[in-house]
Image: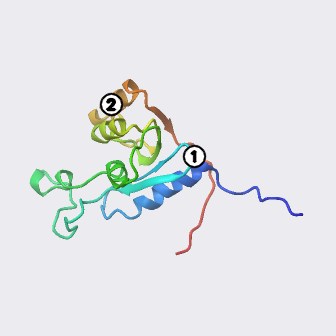
Amino acid sequence: MSEKRNDYINWDEYFMGIAHLSAMRSKDPNTQVGACIVSNENKIMSMGYNGFPNGCSDDDFPWGKTQDELNSKYLYSTHGELNAILNYRGGSLEGSKMYVTLFPCNECAKAIIQAGIRQVVYDSDKYEGTLAVIASKRMLSAAGVKVTKYEHTGREVLIRL
């Protein structure tokens, strides 16, 4: 009888990998963010990435960052975390966990809290110290949402497509 293999990826690697793979769907030329929401039973509930709302062609809306707010992506794009929440069609997300490639902004933090997500595992915090992230951390803490920095294992995973 052969033994089970020991080099399989753990749950955190798996779900953060799904978040990173989801981020690859984003057409944003500067920042690609992916999110994966999972149940307490380690089942994927939803995924999302940053992009424009359904029906808004990504050929007709701006992807750039400009001083002209009306022609800047920020008024039109939906963040990966919010898309993952809005993509869920199964009822309540109460008690779930979100894996996200970038620390959530204040607007996404509000949605995470309101959706009942109880834990956030993030990879990058490249906007640490900005007002949006400071406010986000303050709200997540006040609401009792557990926030954890993803611990890289150094494992490389190759996916051939």
User: Which of the 4 image quadrants contains residue 160?
Assistant: bottom right
Crowding at dot 1, Cα within 10 Å, few <14 / some 14-19 / many 20+, comes out as few
Q: Which residue is at 60% across, 49% downward?
A: 11
Q: Position of residue 103 (x, y in %)?
A: 39, 42
Q: Position of residue 12 (x, y in %)?
A: 57, 47
Q: Position of residue 37 (x, y in %)?
A: 45, 49
Q: Is residue 6 left or right of residue 79?
A: right
- Distance from the alpha carbon under mark 1 to that under mark 2: 31 Å
Farthest residue in the front direction? 91
Which SS class for mark 1?
A: loop
Q: Which residue is at 18% across, 62% downward?
A: 62
Q: Which residue is at 39% across, 37% downward?
A: 116
Residue 68 in view? no
Q: Which residue is at 36% across, 40% downward?
A: 115
Crowding at dot 2, Cα within 10 Å, few <14 / some 14-19 / many 20+, comes out as some
User: Which of the 4 image quadrants contains residue 129?
Assistant: top left
> Residue 63, which numbered label?
none
Q: Which residue is mark 1?
A: 41
Q: Which amino acid type is shown beneath numbered disc 2?
A: Ile
| Residue 103 or residue 145, whichever sits in front | 145
| Residue 98 or residue 27, whichever sits in front | 98
Q: Which residue is mark 2?
A: 134
Circles 1 and 2 in contact, beta carbons < 8 Å: no
Farthest residue in the bottom direction? 161
| Residue 75 or residue 97, whichever sits in front | 97
Q: Which amino acid type is shown beneath numbered disc 1?
A: Glu
Which SS class for mark 2?
A: helix
